[in-house]
Amino acid sequence: MSQLNDIKQRIEEKIKADGLDAKEVKGKIGLRSGKVLAFISASTPDDPEAIAKLKQAAKEVLNLYL
Amino acid sequence: MKWNSIRTKVLAALVACLIVGVGCMLALMHYSFERNAQVLAAESVTGSQKLFTILEAREISKMTAVSEALIMNPQVRDGFVAKDRTRLLELTAPLYSSVKREGVTNWMFHTPEPDMTVFLRLHNPPKFGDHLNRFMDKEVVRTHAMVTGNELARAGFAVRILRPFYDSQGGVTGYVEFGEELGQFIHAMKNQTGNDYGLLLSKKFMDRQFWADSSAVWKRRDNWDDNPSFVVADKTTASDSIIRFDGDLSAVPDQGKVLERFQEGNSVFVRGIFPIRDAAGNTVGAMFVVRDISSFYLAMRRTRAILVILTVAVLTLGMLFVLTLLTRLVFRRLEHIIVVATRVVGGDYESEIQVSSDDEVGQFEQLFEQFRRVFVDVMAHVPELQEKG
């Protein structure tokens, strides 16, 4: 399973759990990490740099430590 | 507040403009006050100098008129010709009391040259027979005509007239002199102008014993030792600040000069000085002029306070106006673009940017909306791309 996709799912779970505006939060994370979450799927190949940026964006926007 | 935002930078620039504006206004007010205080002080010096000259001329006219009446009096003339001091004193003492009330402080009869001694002093009858040997004495002997001017004598510094006294045949039998203490002038000047005055006399032209004698005659404190180079003949205020002076009296220019502005308690004053010359043209003293400019100073401070409040209020309103304008025209529209861009990236393909104007931000809104449509179109084909991939 793609690690990027795993992170994406953890982010979506957190948004759902906190009852946040999914499109706004995903947009912020996407802009900060440079990765559009809609483009990430199970087949997306892992890229260490993209993973680090996505984790950092999740921490800044959602206070989610991955 | 974001320190690197345009809003913060604009606000900082506006606050800086406010501070600079208020600072410039305060500096301008200070300069204006200094200049006006200088003009007021210069006016006080010039006006006082003119008033002094007018009073001097008026008193000379008065003493001339009295002397004319005296010369025409045959009893006085005969008493003087006969050198009958007792008779002359009897005849003139009542008149002296009258003229003394009008300000005449000195009245003397002098014997003719070559001796020219004091024959009778109405203001100090027991003292006579002394030689004065002043500039005016020499001038009246040389010209046999009336001489006027300021002259130091045993009784002090006075504006005087000295004129020949003729017998019935027209020969000079002696001289008569009237004088008015210059110290008296300053009280009249204060009454007319409200300014304070101080009359200083240079010790260089005075005799220590002269001053002690005149102090005794006029029943005033002998203040010879109070200052190193001058004595205070009179002043209209108890304060000594009026006569603070370290310079050389003879160096004071003819037109006078402004000295400084100073504060005493809640009052603000400007001070000036002009020279006093004797009949020979020597600068024997100086007159200090002190003008109270407290009301002007208070008015200036009030104006300054009003101007500061007005400036701050107007500039603050200006700042608010500029910030509101920038918020409406730029910041709010940029924030909307950011919100839409964020939501589009987050998957909200329905959010659109409404182009609200054709200004610079409007052009950017239009460009961004076109970009958004392209992005949405690309996103719509993502599954196809993935399937193709």
Image (spheres, coloured by chain):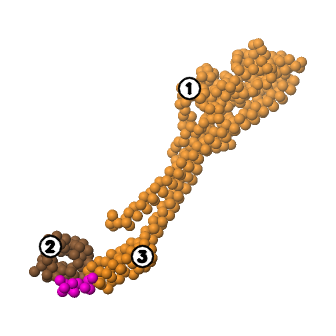
Q: Nearer the viewer, mark 3 or mark 2?
A: 2
- The chain carrying label 1 is B
Chain that the image shows in brown: A
Secondary structure of residue under mark 1: loop
Q: State the separation of the CA atoms marked 2 and 1.
A: 98 Å
Along the line of sight, which residue is nearer the eye, B76 or B178? B178
Name the mark nearer the viewer: 2 or 1: 2
Q: Quadrant of residue B137?
A: top right
Q: Are marks 3 and 2 on the same chain?
A: no
Q: What colour is chain B?
A: orange
Give the left or right position of residue B302, taking residue B114 as reference. Answer: left
Q: Residue type at mark 1: give it.
A: Ser
Q: Chain of mark 3?
A: B
Question: Dot 3 corresponds to which residue?
Answer: B362
Question: Badge 3 local density, few (<14 within 10 Å), some, or many (20+)?
Answer: some
Q: Are the residues tagged 3 and 2 within 8 Å (C-beta)?
A: no
Residues marked 2 and 1 touching at CB (< 8 Å):
no
> Circle 2 is placed at which residue position?
A47
- Report how far apart the C-alphas of labels 3 and 1 lie in the structure: 83 Å
Q: Residue at x 60, y 31 (%)?
A: B252
Q: From this viewpoint, which residue is outermost toward the right?
A: B169
Q: For the residue marked with disc 2, what is the amino acid?
A: Asp
Residue in view at x 55 percent, y 30 percent: B247
Q: Position of residue B254 (x, y in %)?
A: 65, 32
- State the residue lying farthest toward the front: B388
Where residue B93 sits, quadrant-wise, is top right
Q: Which residues are magenta?
A: B378-389
Q: Is residue B49 left or right of residue B5?
A: right
Q: Secondary structure at mark 2?
A: loop
According to the image, label 1 marks what residue? B229
Residue B171 image position (x, y, % from top left): 86, 17
